[in-house]
Image: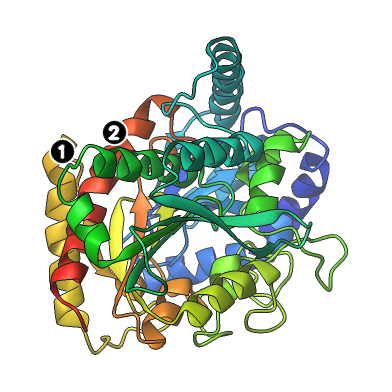
Amino acid sequence: MRLYLAVFALLAAVHCEELINGDQVLRINAESEDHIQILKMLERDVDSGLDFWTHGFSTERPVDIRVPHSSLHAVKDFLKKNNIPFTVMINNVQELLVREREEMARNAEVERQTKGFDFAAYHDLETIYNFMDTLVASHSNLISKVNIGSTYENRPMYVLKFSTGGEKRPAIWIDAGIHAREWISHATAVWLADRIATDFKENRAPVPSILSKMDIYLMIVANPDGYVFTHRSPNEFYRLWRKSRSATSNPKCQGVDLNRNWDAEFGGPGASDDPCAEDYRGPSAQSEIEVKNIADFIMSHGNFKSFMTLHSYKQLLMYPYGYSGTDAPDRTELHDVASQASKALNSWHGTVYKVGSIFHIIEPASGASVDWAYQRGIKYSFAFELRDTGEYGFLLPANQIVSTARETWYALRYIMQYVCDHPY
């Protein structure tokens, strides 16, 4: 085992200077406790160059790992010698990255020529923020843009407020993109913003009824610095960047996993204290300005009744807890609401979502936003993992954006209506 870890570290050092041409995503199925312990050791070795796309080791669910091309032979040989089954989910990550970049360039050129906005395309932060301004200008009677603070790199953090009037009315919170590489979440949120505005304008149920009782706050980009980095970095590897961009105690490793930094059993299972780890929790609870800005805004408002966050990938609809396998006090109701919302989502395109607590159906995750919201009295707190189940992973083709957004809207719409009908 130590020999292979040393080999991985050596290959990773070489790989750091390379593109990721030929990298593969392997789906690994642990069949025993020994297998699980081996995978945990691999994950802890942050110098190995292995990029864990999914976590939460169990014999009940596989783990997806992006393996550098230079390490593929060693990794596959190691898995075979330890009798750990695996399949190749993505044969060449570079091909998907090139296709995505070329498609974005073509879409951007079309948008420049037509002065339009294509919801079936991925966009950078500047374009998303411009879209928000245009939407606000077109629906000024309904939407306002709220600046809730600045990021580590001094970018503004904006929330769209959908309201028919009044201050601090009962409200619903939706955010996306707290993990930078999960581009489908940002794109879905963009589509949702337009849909909420359009449905209200056209008096299409249930949006007018919901907004007559509650406000909706939608944060399209919860991690602006990380998102910009996924677009601008000259190294294509950083399209797959997950964290923020703050400095850490290790000058070679930047960023904090913002969804492990919340003041909700901070430092518990499913979060690392290693600044180089993908799930690095940060030095203390809510040490990260992005998390603090969101938390302060929600607490100062004081009347949120639902908290929903959009992630990818896995096709899951989850509720508290992430830090513990113990049932939340409202577990029965939350499971029923999530199950009905999942059925609503499925009705559009037949997409199947699994429903359950974060801890049980994806991975232990302390310091997560959904647990934080629930612990502060926001009962209807849910996390979505959007498409897909691994065929493309974080590199979901843009031609799936609208279908993903539309089916997600069916689920969100159900939850929002339920929250309106069950005041507390």
Please provide percent x and percent y for residue 325. Answer: 32, 83
Please provide percent x and percent y for residue 311. Answer: 43, 54
The label number, if any, that marks residue 116 in the structure image: none
Apparent side of residue 70 relative to residue 371 in the rendered image (left or right) = right
> How many residues crowd mark 2 within 10 Å: few (<14), some (14–19), many (20+)?
some
Pointer 1 with pointer 2, Cβ within 8 A: yes
Q: Secondary structure at mark 2?
A: helix
User: In which quadrant will I find the C terminus?
Assistant: bottom left
Amino acid at the residue labelled 1: Trp
- Which circle's residue, 1 or 2, is located before the other in the chain? 1
Q: Name the foreground residue: 109 vs 93.
A: 109
> On the image, numbered disc 1 is attached to which residue?
348
Q: Name the foreground residue: 262 vs 48.
A: 262
Q: Secondary structure at mark 1?
A: helix
Q: Name the foreground residue: 420 vs 176.
A: 420
Task: Using the numbered discs, state the Cα–Cα distance from disc 1 to disc 2 in whole angstroms.
Answer: 8 Å
Say above or below: 138 vs 417: above
> On the image, numbered disc 2 is attached to which residue?
403
